[in-house]
Amino acid sequence: MRSYSVYPYTPNGPGTAVAYPPAWEETDDYAEFEPAYEDGWYDEAGYVLEEEWVAPQPPGMPAVILVGLVVVLALIGAAVHLSGQARGEQIAYTPPPASGGPVSKLYVENPTAVVAPYDEYTITQGPHGQSYGHLAIDLAAGRGEPVKSPINGFVTNLYVDQYGNTTLVLENDVYTVIMLHGDYAVAVGDQVRAGQVVGAEGNNGYTMDFFGNLCYGRVHCGNHTHLNIYDKRLQANVNPLDLLP
């Protein structure tokens, strides 16, 4: 049986890397759990629920009670998992780039327009990431599904952080959008429009399956888009759920 304990989540701190991780070969490990999600069960206070084993019950307990407890715990775990609270990430904090970034002109028509990065998707985790400077949500449509630009703007950064998270930064005069984990097919300086395909959903970087195992090397594991939106007018991150149609 399993139970859950709560402990504060502490990221490993800032830093970036310059090389993309090697290409992974597909394996069948944990394929039966697709779509799988990352470990780390966040509550509203920003804590992570970590799985731990519970000692077996005394031999005198009737077998029917043991079976009943196992079923109840499984149903509770599945409900929390499907509610989108079963994710955990290691993300290097990256402050929003200064207005303009490497692009001298960020003006675009309708800079306040925001669309979802997918036509159809599931929200797998609500707002999270305050500990590393984000207020992001996680969305999933399926590995390889097109990822679209949420705004009209420019690509002002594209890099891989210290955890291997592919990081795409889009910007205009109103918003800075950060998206993680995808296989992105744009370059710094490109102008993009809201709804334009900028890459494909992936699991690049620090992602985990339902059981807390890292997804490195397993393609059917932890695929999603981490979406953070920074409003320059407020000089603060905003809840993407308040902006998506």
Image (spheres, rainbow, N blue to C red):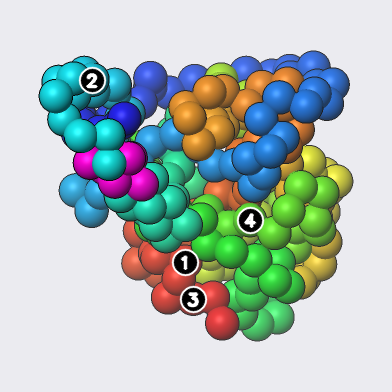
Q: Quadrant of residue 219?
A: top right
**Main SS category, magenta section:** helix
Q: What secondary structure is marked by label 2? A: loop
Q: Are marks 3 and 2 in contact (CB under 8 Å)?
A: no
Relative to the observer, which residue lies in front, 163 or 55? 55
Q: Amino acid at mark 2?
A: Pro
CA distance for labels 1 and 3:
5 Å
CA distance separating discs 2 and 1: 43 Å
Which of pointers 2 and 1 indicates the residue nearer the eye? Answer: 2
Of labels 3 and 4, the one closer to you: 4
Q: Residues within 10 Å of mark 2 (few under 14, many from 20)?
A: few
Q: Amino acid at mark 4?
A: Ala
The numbered dot on residue 243 is: 3
Q: CA distance from mark 3 to mark 4?
A: 17 Å
Quadrant of the image occupied by residue 218: top right
Q: Is residue 19 above or below residue 26?
A: above
Q: Nearer the viewer, residue 97 or 35?
A: 35
Of pointers 1 and 4, the one earlier in the residue sequence: 4
Magenta-drawn segment:
65-71
Q: Position of residue 221 (x, y in %)?
A: 66, 36
Asked if marks 1 and 3 touch (Cβ < 8 Å), the reply is yes
